[in-house]
Image: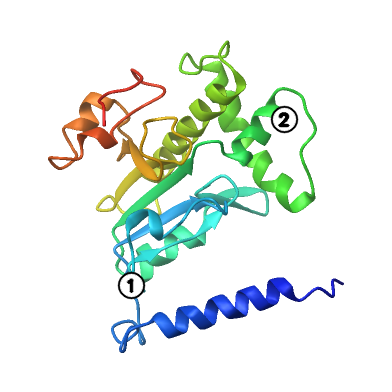
Amino acid sequence: MGTDRSTLERLLAGNRRHVESLPDEYFADVQTGQHPTAVAVCCSDSRVSHEGMWGIDRPGAIFTPSNIGNQVWDEDDGERIIDGGVLYPIHHTGTDAVAVVGHTGCGAVTAAYHVAAGAEPPGPQGVDKWVDMLVPVVEEALESSLIDRDANADTVVNQLVEYNVGYQARSLCEADEIPDTASVYGFVYDFQGVYGDRPGRTYLVSVDGETDPDALIELVPDGYESTVKSLLYGGEVSTD
């Protein structure tokens, strides 16, 4: 095992700064329970700030399960089921909104794209499990008319990212375990300037299974129209 403790020191020092920065009574409202407003299923990518993207600066606001490829499911004895990280806050903390959050340049989607094209899974087995679950989504996308297969690889991957977000969100809408009263949103977190020139913005690409940008524009509050953009359905809808 490694003997360099510099990373451990950085982690401990970071936590010390965290503790020292907390105001009094920071955890007062959540010490005995939690009632997060939404559960946000993000990709487990170090570049994606799971709470920072929403401007969250207090505990208990967002339930944040994450995995490779922001997938809403898992496998149990060969059966695909909705992941418990999504279901727990909905069934046990009163949460009534789910956000599926993909991100530009996603390595999981890229790996699934390569596997769909005939490459070997990236390994090790714990990674391959999640990539393999994405491959059918990518294959369906490539067989559709929504992906520009003649575009450069980065463009194709980012189109697949958006397709996957819509697919995952639609899977939740169709799942018996998700109450009809729950709202399901799909976002792409853009830190590469793919959708616009405001790095860190989440772009809305799906609401309760709806992906048509014109319909989504009608659903967002006034002043947020520029957050609705799509690489699949009509390209750029509005400008920043």
* Residue located farthest toward the left when viewing the structure as drawn: 222
The reply to whether discs 1 and 2 touch (Cβ–Cβ < 8 Å) is no
The picture places residue 159, in percent across and down from the top left corner, at: 49, 26
Q: Regarding mark 2 in the picture, which secondary structure is present there?
A: helix
> What is the distance, in whole Å, between disc 1 and disc 2 at their CAs?
40 Å
* 160 is higher (above) or lower (below) than 184: above
Image point 55% across, 22% down: which residue? 156
> Which circle marks residue 58 in the picture?
1
The picture places residue 122, in percent across and down from the top left corner, at: 77, 40
Q: Amino acid at mark 2?
A: Val
Q: Regarding mark 1 in the picture, which secondary structure is present there?
A: loop
Tell which of 72 and 214 is nearer to you: 214
Quadrant showing the N terminus: bottom right
Q: Residues within 10 Å of mark 1 (few under 14, many from 20)?
A: few
> Which circle marks residue 178 in the picture?
none
Q: Amino acid at mark 1?
A: Arg
- How did the renderer colour the structure? rainbow
Nearer to us of marks 1 and 2 is 1
